[in-house]
Amino acid sequence: MPVSERQYIQTFTDYLKFEKRYSAHTIASYSNDLISFFDFLETSYGVQQIREVQSVMVRSWLAELKEKGMTGVTLNRKISSLKSFFKFQLKSGGVEQSPMGQIISPKKGRRLPVFVKEEEARSLNTVLQSGAEDWKSLNARMLVGIFYATGMRLSELIGLKDQQIDPDREQIKVLGKGNKERVIPVSRELLDLIRTYQALRNKEFARTEETLLVTEKGKKMYPRYAWKLVNQVLGAGSSLDKRSPHVLRHSFATHLMNHGADLNAVKELLGHSSLAATQVYTHTTIEKLKDIHKKAHPRG
């Protein structure tokens, strides 16, 4: 690589380090992307000056990377590196026009949510009921029960306070992202479980926190503790490789959709700000409809 291009890269990475305060890992990624790009230009096009770079050269580099099997996510990162670099060069006078203006990032494939099958969700209750009556078992039962019944986020559940639970109206008020409040209806069965838990908690521990869920030491539950318990329960009662509280949130939404719930209603229950975030659950519904059609229709 020509010395001049190395100097441009060094100036840019200094800017990322001292002005943008990027992490060392991020700066190294940007630098490696740029070195790889300019090495390609020198080998393939004999480019010696940064002003010689054209859009067609960028596309050629990206096409070569794609042919080598590079994923869309990694390609997008490399495009981002080049866009940031040439934007900086425009501002600092390194180039008069960016070659990235006509470069479009490849669309990211949306991954379908991982969820517990309905028959496995029913068996989870058996797993929870068979556990010893210690605090970890009680907490596991509460966590899985509330996650699956309400679709809450982990942060929302561990921050849930007693006063947010309204047994008379059979609902829970949840404080979500951006301090946006939403109301989730819950069953009498879940409320009875919560009431029993509260009574045991108040008998066992002096109350220093307002939150509903506590550890076996009576302290406020924390994310790692909750994640670990849910992971253990799902490992014992489901066939999933991915096991986390968010899987139960996905299961809540997917099972609602599979039983005909309105998409807008599911959006409100999940606390999504945009319907687009909820629409991912329609994919699993469509797959179920295809399966029903195949099994039930004479020509399915």
Image (cartoon, rainbow, N blue to C red):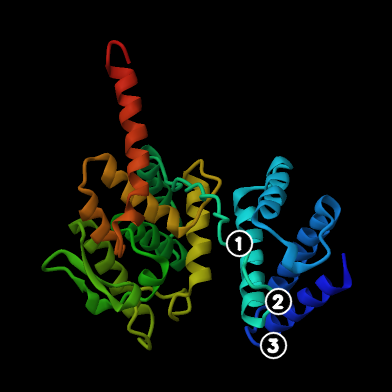
- In front here: 87 or 276? 87
Judged left or right of residue 264, residue 32 is right
- In front here: 105 or 47? 47
Residue contact between numbered discs 1 and 3, judged by CB atoms under 8 Å? no
Front disc: 1 or 2: 2
Residue 192 percent coordinates (x, y): 22, 62
Query: Residue 159: which disc?
Result: none
- Residue at 71% across / 40% down in the picture? 67
- In front here: 3 or 282? 3
Q: Which residue is mark 2?
A: 94
Residue 53 percent coordinates (x, y): 72, 61
Query: Residue 18: which disc?
Result: 3
Mark positioned earlier in the residue sequence (1 or 3): 3
Quarter containing the N terminus: bottom right
Q: Which residue is mark 1?
A: 100
Q: CA distance from mark 2 to mark 3?
A: 19 Å
Residue contact between numbered discs 1 and 2, judged by CB atoms under 8 Å? no
